[in-house]
Amino acid sequence: MKSPVALPASTVTRNAVVLLAAVAVGAALYWLRDILTPLAMAIFLLIMIDGVKRAIERRLKLPPRAAGLAALLLVILGFFASIGILVNGAAGFFTDASGVSANLGPRLDAILRDGAALFGLGAAPTAAELVEGVDLRGYLTDLAFQMQGILSGAFFVLVYLGFLLAAQAGFRKKLVAMFPNRESRGEALSVFERVRSGVEGYLWVQTVTGALICAVAWALMRAVGLQNAEFWTFVIFVVGFIPVLGGAIAGLAPPLFALVQFESYWPALILLIGLQTILFLVGNLVQPRMQGDNQNIDPVVVLLSLALWGKLWGVIGMFLSTPLAVMAMAILAEFRGSRWIAVLLSGDGEPDGPPRPGSGPGQAHARDKPPRRSAPAAPPADH
């Protein structure tokens, strides 16, 4: 019988320290979530502004200062417009839903009876029996507090964003001071470029595919006559940035509301089949072609990241789960001791990504570089 391989004491100690540090960081992220979530959203918006600025410079040939101002105005206006559409759309949704609520109880009873008859379950419970004991007032109160938290959080996001924009001017000086060596500074910039390109690629793919899904969804909802089609279209676009759960909400929420609004089941069935078809086609044909190497993340990691950040930071954590996973992979790939984690996070085992178009044949790619070694200590000077 072969004896088990004994790990060096230094390896065991290092792994234990890494595990304890991960637990401590997770606890700090959860404890400081009220402070860190607006900051994370502000950084996310800052990366978005930088991407829009470079796109404006490239397409409209504007000077950097004018392009930056235009990008800032576009992103801030889009941010406020999103909040306004969400609040006004929700108000209109509940107003229209109050007209449906008069027929809500009998309609739900009819749906339950038809479902029980379809599956041969005998007598079906009534809607009143199902919701008996449910604290609706408590749920509405929690919803009101969450809406208030969204508005106050939006204010702090803009405050953080303003300070981050003001601090951008000294970023180059800080980078030079932190990395005096030109090679180390180039490696730090390459990490930043990978993080930025990954986040921008994620934003681009989700925005284009979300717009495509929303166009088809809006046409379907208008065709069947679903109330608040514009509100549902905006909801589908927003939740599209949440991996896994976004598709489930987009494909099921409008058909479920159509069940209550219409006497017939056909509108809900049309919406269900149409939305599931467009989600399947976009998710399996369009997105993989657009993503390329921008989101070289294992699907299991996407799911685990969604669960982890959703637990730590709630809904905002779900929105930022994939960009945060991209950032973590790019940073962990730079250090020899943590590169194995980046390999596990990646989709193809190459967390460094493909060579950049601007790199010539004489420039070594990050994955081809030998692991960094500490320089030998200089011999003591003779006095």
Image (cartoon, rainbow, N blue to C red):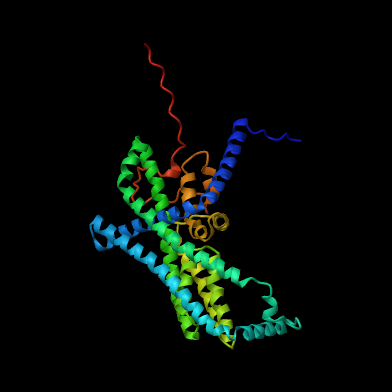
The one of 346 and 166 positioned closer to us in this rendering: 166
Quadrant position of residue 209 = bottom left
Could you say where residue 344 lies in the image, as x and y percent from the top left?
55, 49
Q: Is residue 65 above or below residue 250?
A: above
Residue at point 52%, 64% (across, down): 145
Q: Where's the C terminus, which quadrant?
A: top left
Q: Does residue 147 appear in the picture of this structure?
A: yes
Could you say where residue 381 lies in the image, as x and y percent from the top left?
38, 15
Residue at point 54%, 73% (across, down): 251
The mark total stands at 0
Quadrant position of residue 111 = bottom right
Q: Does residue 200 appear in the picture of this structure?
A: no
- Left or right of 174 on screen, residue 248: right
Name, please, the residue furthest toward the top: 383
The one of 274 and 320 positioned closer to us in this rendering: 320
Q: Where's the N terminus, which quadrant?
A: top right
Residue at point 47%, 80% (across, down): 228
The one of 213 and 134 positioned closer to us in this rendering: 134
Q: Is residue 377 above or below residue 110?
A: above
Name, please, the residue furthest toward the bottom: 263
Could you say where residue 47 lies in the image, as x and y percent from the top left?
38, 55
- Left or right of 284 on screen, residue 160: left
